[in-house]
Amino acid sequence: MNIIDFECDTPTKEAVEDTVRLIQSGRGFDKEGYAQQMAPGWAAQIGMSLEEFNEAKASEGLTSLALKLCEVDMTRAMSHAQVIEMLDTAGVARACIGNAGRRASNEDVAKFAAEHPDRLIPWFRIWGEEGQAGVAKLEHGVRELGVKGFEVSSYREGRYINDPAYWPFLAKCVELDIPVRITAGLHLLSDRPYDYAHPKYLDEVAVRFPTLRIIAGLSGWPWVAETCAIASRHQHLYIDFACRRVKHMLAPGAGYEALVYYGARNLQDKIIFGSGWGTHMIPLAQLVAETDELPLKDSVRAKWMGGNAARVLKLG
């Protein structure tokens, strides 16, 4: 089975540097909603108890703690060779990079992928506010740097998925024949509306751009059934389940029943594996092994784990 990880974290030195830039620009994950969920893990990584972390949050603020976490991350940053070794250990043939929560700058992503063109698939993320200059960056990335996809996380920009700011970018994706991956589902940035990335807005995108290959990133939870329904309406709309552990997806009441049921049937050509292992802080190899639990025929699992991604990316 040819496994493709559709969202592979690459916590290199360059990625940590870009995370610092995002935090300093106000677009990092140093927000209360994420802190409520991630605090135990963040505290442990910094070397604090949860109580100490919460006290520091009250006195110093989350941004200060987020930057401390980056200092820790820099001490254990992976080399490029270690990233490739991680893929080998996990049995992953190819990995998409540049589309994870923590990733390097577009330029550094492209450089890293160029070192291993048979293993790494670079994606660009460009803010909608960059307008035509951003569209030009995307075109340069594809034509000159080998970029294979465009990533949109609208909620991080304070936009809805169907914001007109993205139309020029998506039109360029059609022209360049590359897919767009749009984060869909509940976000935890508690300083803005919860539904910026509601999958229902993907329907308008797919109607407006009927030939554009669209991936609903992160499956659209807690509106997974709606994501599946919209994918059934549009020929070129796919769903990845990055940052979702299989054992949690299969738990009763978890909200993934539609994806598992229809993904084994009429949507079997539209479901895509992504690990998002950096979000879990669980080794990539373990997350790949856990997919053995999926109640799928071998032929369907092969599609989920790589076949569908290869088709979306036109890997041949």
Image (spheres, helix red, strand yellow):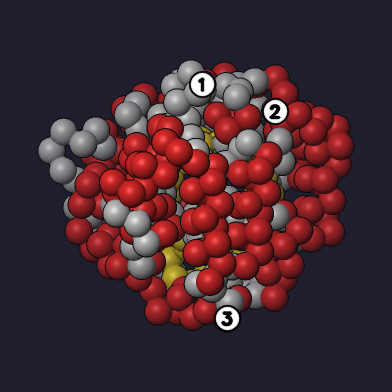
State which tag comes first along the sequence, 2 or 1. Answer: 2
**In the image shown, does 175 or 80 lie closer to the viewer?**
80
Look at mark 1 in the image and give the residue it sits on: 192
Q: Which residue is tagged 2?
A: 166
In the picture shown, does residue 35 fall above or below 224? below
* CA–CA distance in space, label 1 to label 3: 39 Å
Tag of residue 81: 3
Instruction: Work out whether 28 lies above or below 284.
Output: above
Most foreground residue, 67 or 185: 67
Residue 224 placement: quadrant: top left
Mark 2 → mark 1, Cα distance in angstroms: 19 Å
Q: Earlier in the sequence, mark 1 or mark 3?
A: 3
- The one of 258 and 81 positioned closer to us in this rendering: 81
Indicate the position of residue 149 as horizontal and vertical percent values: 65, 49
What amino acid type should be assigned to the residue bearing mark 3? Answer: Ala
N-terminal of the pair, mark 3 or mark 2, is 3
